[in-house]
Amino acid sequence: LGSFITEPAAMTLTALMLRDRYFSRGLSNRLKYATLGMLFVNVSIGGTLTHFAAPPVLMVAAKWQWDTPFMITHFGWKAAVAVFVNAVVLTWLFRRELITKGNTDEHTGRAPMPLAMAGIHLAFLFGVVLFAHHPVVFMGLFLFFLGFTEAYKAHQDRLILREGLLVAFFLAGLVVLGGMQQWWLQHALVGVEPTLLYFLATALTAVTDNAALTYLASLVEGVSPEFKYAIVAGAVTGGGLTFIANAPNPAGVAILKSSFDDESISPMGLFLAALPPTCVAIVAFQVL
């Protein structure tokens, strides 16, 4: 779903479901970290089915003239295979714990949301995605949505505006300040063999953020199609290794950290948990 409702939205919704339906049921830390690592990797690579949902793709799509059919044929189907394999393997490995502690057949006590209310939410979601590049219409829809949620509080959860703004300010700062990093990243990327560039991008994205990496790569002129594929594929592959590797990751951390010991997530624990699904993504993008 991250390819259609944007990666930050997919991260937020999935993290909320994991927190309320699974992490709150006393799962082992091993399963929590494994799930967190897979979530971050799958969201990072899963946004490549379209040209507008993943921050690293959004940064280059317009300049390199990539549209949704191009993304599906060059990136999306490979990412879908990796996402499926990651999910199936993790579910099978922890099947016993999921069966005993992951039963979700509980009632929340809240009245079911009317279909009309759900339809209005979907209409707002469709509208903001459709008019994401038309600020006047976008802001009008957003303000209308805020008023709607205030008027019908009985069927609304708390709006997680703070987490959303963290992502928004990060991407805005990237566009404003990213060019200042070009002096070292450009020399590190230009002239590198595509396969080596792919692994270099996978490693660099963990410490620079994948959207920053692709944005700076888009500033380089006269690059080959192989360069473009390697830099974007590598950037999304490494998007789950650290908290800062992908823009939606901080939102996921903010939602899920209360479920971990001492309400904190270990950076090393996340890195180790994300390595296996990252390796699956490497195979998908380099072999398939």
Image (tube, rainbow, N blue to C red):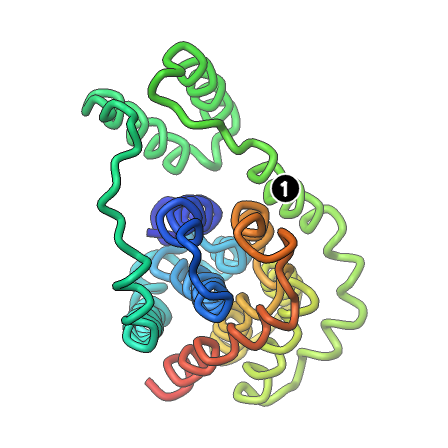
Residue 284 % position (x, y): 37, 81
Task: Say which of 245 and 173 sits in front.
Answer: 245
Q: Is residue 52 left or right of residue 98?
A: right
Q: Who's the residue at 72% across and 72% down the image?
A: 186
**Is 90 in front, or is 213?**
90
Q: Quadrant of residue 70?
A: bottom left
User: Does residue 250 appear left or right of residue 149 in this picture?
Assistant: right
Figure quadrant of residue 201: bottom right
Res 248 seen here: no
In the image, residue 38 lies at what x, y percent? 44, 67
Report the residue marked by disc 1: 166
> For numbered disc 1, what is the local secondary structure?
helix
> In the image, 234: left or right of 15?
right
Q: Position of residue 147 (x, y in %)?
A: 45, 13
Q: Is residue 284 above or below residue 102?
A: below
Can you say whether 109 is above or below 95 in the image?
above
In this rendering, the answer to whether 124 lies above or below 227 is above
The residue shown at (43%, 44%) is 16
Task: Examine the image and state in which quarter residue 91 appears.
Answer: bottom left
